[in-house]
Image: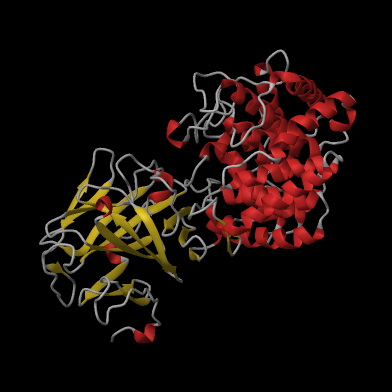
Amino acid sequence: MHLPPPAADRSPYTGYTRAHWESAADALLAAAAPYADRSRALYHFPGDRVSWAGRLSDGLEGYARTLLLAAFRRDETVLERYAEGLAAGTAGVWPRIEDRGQPLVEAASIALALRLTRESLWDRLDDAVRQRAAAWLADALTAEAWPCNWELFPVTVGGFLESVGYEAAASRKAVERGLERIERWYVGDGWYTDGDGRKFDYYNGWAMHLYPVVHAWLADDSDLLSVYGPRLSAHLADYARLFGADGAPMHQGRSLTYRFATTAPLWLGALTGHTPLSPGETRRLASGALRYFLERGAVDDRGLLTLGWHGPDERVLQGYSGPASPYWASKGFLGLLLPPDHEVWTATEEPGPAEREDAVTPLTAPNWLLQTTCSDGLVRLHNHGSEDVRYDPYYTRLAYSTVTTPSASYDNSVIVGGDPGRTGIVPLGAGTTWAASRHTAAGGTAEVTTLVVASGATEIRAHVVTGAPAGTPVRITGWAPAEGVRTELLPVTGIGAELTVETDPSGLPSVTGRTGEAVAVTGRTGEASGGGAGADPALFVTLARLTAEPEPAPLERTVTVEVCEAHELHLSWSDGGRECHLLPLGPGREGKTCRFPSSPAEEFPA
């Protein structure tokens, strides 16, 4: 992909300007064009993969998602090609929109694109084509959606059809119904779950916020915008912290192959005026993400977006991922709706959160703890509240980062009795330096309560295992290895005569011990008897670190950990800070409640 020379004066961090975004959009559209069929209604990209929706739906996906990019670019010559495809597609080429079918998703992209380009595309179509297109889209008004972000696809279609006067009452009803349904998933502080449960990921930005805010903005509905705009602004205050200094978004959640779609909510805040970010910071974060992927193989030698993260990578795909799925990255070009003289394009780039300071930030709604170090620009996400309804390595691990990927060896996990599962995650809160949760393990027979405390790049991880018979092996793993970073995991204390440090062939560090034996502690020593499900809990405490610093201080010197009476965790940091945390030892333990306060320094024992 040939881009303009970097503009170091206006963009000292990324070198990217509006011209770079325009060139990238033009290149992606040009590369996709040869893969349209004769009707120009279907785009079949090369490769053997077919999504579970089938090849015909995959071809529609190719049309819809590249049309969305063309709509943001607003190139009338390119839009003429898509006008031909629309005429053919609605004349019988495209599959019908049915309950919970993939065409419902693609209908939303088509409707949004038509709404954005009404004068240059929709209004120039023959009346017969407009009627056919409206009739095809209208099936989305009554189609049953999956109970998640899919509820917003009828909203998007309904908003467009109402704007052109087609079945206005039914369109308005679809909009109201969808917005009402997502309300039950709003949990406050700018965060939604993607359906029932606790599924927190990038769908917050590129779906749950995007569609309602864009609809309200395009409809010029001040009442709706007064609801959804402040939510977006609140979300962006947290969201901006999910990008590393190299531009990498957090490697967590589903549909990661959409890549720089992560920039859509950043642009949306600037577009609607609902953002806490400065213009220079907005562009720095967005351009950083685009550059990050373009420089790491996201586009192949044919100019096509690949199915993966950097280059092709099946680990980040789902069954619904087809050859054209990566083109939902088109949402990242939302910023091109801002005119060239908008301050987001003219301001000088400013550093993002990961470049400004070390920070430990609790996110209350998802019960996450974000840990950022400006010396290496890494961001780590400690997950104590997000999970999918099924096991998913991108939801269920204890931690994620902007530089590591979940490993097949179960990084950032507590493996009880050989079972690496982490289900039934219950958030227990997050504070200034800590987050905690409880989950079931060992096939549901054991329970693990975990506390993480962070400062700088150092983490203290304490795990209390209950319900596991005496002698049950417990393996605790650290960060997965990654190029250019150091991963460390050291034992502090645990149930077991001796904790063993191991490294698997992939380089994943782990610490192993067993339940039901003596507690080895620094300072005072307690006892934990053996037994079955009713036995005293087993406690395991480790130090962990993920860092890109070339010569970091020895991990064991960054903090002193003392476990008193096997339930109080006292921390003394090398910078003089001190904390005390009370560990839960299970129900029925008098005087030992399940709480995780960050105590003031004066409460720390002398």
The one nearer the camera, 219 or 30, is 219
What is the x, y in percent for residue 235?
Answer: 61, 59
What is the x, y in percent for residue 489?
Answer: 27, 55
| Residue plotted at (18% across, 63% down) | 533
Q: Is residue 509 above or below residue 1?
A: below
| Residue plotted at (40% across, 44% down) | 392
The one nearer the camera, 442 or 559, is 442
| Residue plotted at (36% across, 74% down) | 595
**In-image side of 378 versus 163 (left or right):** left
What is the x, y in percent for residue 36?
Answer: 68, 18
The quarter holding residue 128 reads top right
| Residue plotted at (59% across, 51% down) | 204
**In-image side of 486 versus 220 (left or right):** left
Q: From this viewpoint, is residue 369 visible? A: yes
| Image quarter (top left, top right, bottom left or bottom right) of the N terminus | top right
The one nearer the camera, 595 or 239, is 595
**In-image side of 115 versus 64 (left or right):** right
| Image quarter (top left, top right, bottom left or bottom right) of the C terminus | bottom left
